[in-house]
Image: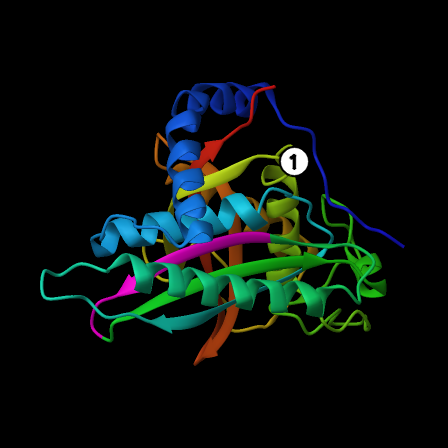
Amino acid sequence: MCVCVCVCASCTKEQQIITNNQNEDTALDKVLSFLDSRNQKSGFDDLSLDESVWYLEAALNYSYCQKHNFYGNEIFDSIVFNYNLDEGGLIDDELLFETYNNMEGFVNDLIRTLKKYPYYNIIGIDIEASEEVDQFILYYGVSFTNDAAKCLPQLPFGSTDYWDYGDGGKCGEYSGCNGYGAATIFESYINGMYGNYPEGCWFTDIQSIKLTSTYPYYPLFADWDPCLSPTQMNTYFYNTHEQGFLRMPSNRNFYHIEINAYFITYPFHEARWKYGILNYPIE
């Protein structure tokens, strides 16, 4: 059974896609030049740390993140790769190519683990540099479908939608659907509603904004009771959606959202929105 959370792109999104096309050729040329140099093992410019992040991130997104289907099960995680700067504070081309090859190897291993599911894809790759420890942090997200996806409730949430704040399933007088909860349901729906771009689109220049359930971001879930009522489910879903779009940079498109559930004194949500420049291939 394939459950795909999908809403057609609005006129507003189409306008954003068209607006961003003016940068597509430049980004594509840079990525293809980098990949060609890597394949030919030919010389490439030594790059600053920021430039290295751009090329690694853009090339991986171009190569592996051109499908944007969300299937109701999402996993977000990260992995680190070491780097060294030369005496001029740059990353030389050999290390850059080696790092890309290592990252690509990880992504291909990830794809192999996903092949056990009927439907799957990598929904995002975001790279940051941690200068304190000389490491690239590769954040990634995957989406896949299995039988658990049938637990996704309908919007708006109805009278039986009492859900654990994280992924503990139904709660209150209801039970079942372990692995789903308010955090995972919000995440699946917001990604499915706004991240379903046409196949072939890819992102560059990714930015992230992280908000937690503390002032002034209290509209995200935070309560003493980890069991959300239908009213709370609707309220916090709307608030989570609104907080991210209120803070979207004017020159970026929505990429995806990751929602984590924590319990420190009381249960609460932390949301990380990703935005980027959308490159849309024109036939």
Q: Which residues are magenta?
A: 123-132
Mark 1 lies on a secondary structure that is loop
Residue 260: x percent and y percent? 52, 66
Report the residue at 61% width, 35% height from top: 200
| x then y, percent, for residue 103 | 47, 64
Q: How many marks?
A: 1
Disc 1 residue type (three-letter) = Glu
Q: Is residue 205 left or right of residue 6?
A: left
**In the picture shown, does residue 254 fall above or below 225?**
above
Q: Nearer the viewer, residue 46 or 153?
A: 46
Residue 219 in view of the camera: no
| Residue for point 70% across, 67% down | 112
Horizontal arrangement in the rendering, residue 85 relative to residue 139 (left or right): left
Count residues near mark 1 (Cα–Cα under 10 Å), then give few for <14, some for 14-19, many for 20+.
few
Q: Is residue 164 left or right of residue 260?
A: right
* Quadrant into which the C terminus falls: top right
Residue indicated by mark 1: 199
Q: Residue 278, image x and y in percent? A: 47, 33
Specify whether residue 16 is painted magenta: no
Residue 88 visible in the shown view: yes
Closer to the camera, 126 or 178?
Answer: 126
Residue at the (81%, 60%) spot, across then down: 151
Query: In the rendered view, would you say 224 is above or below 259?
Result: below
Q: Work out which quarter of the rendered image holds the N terminus and state it.
A: bottom right
Asked whether 130 falls inside the magenta stretch, the response is: yes
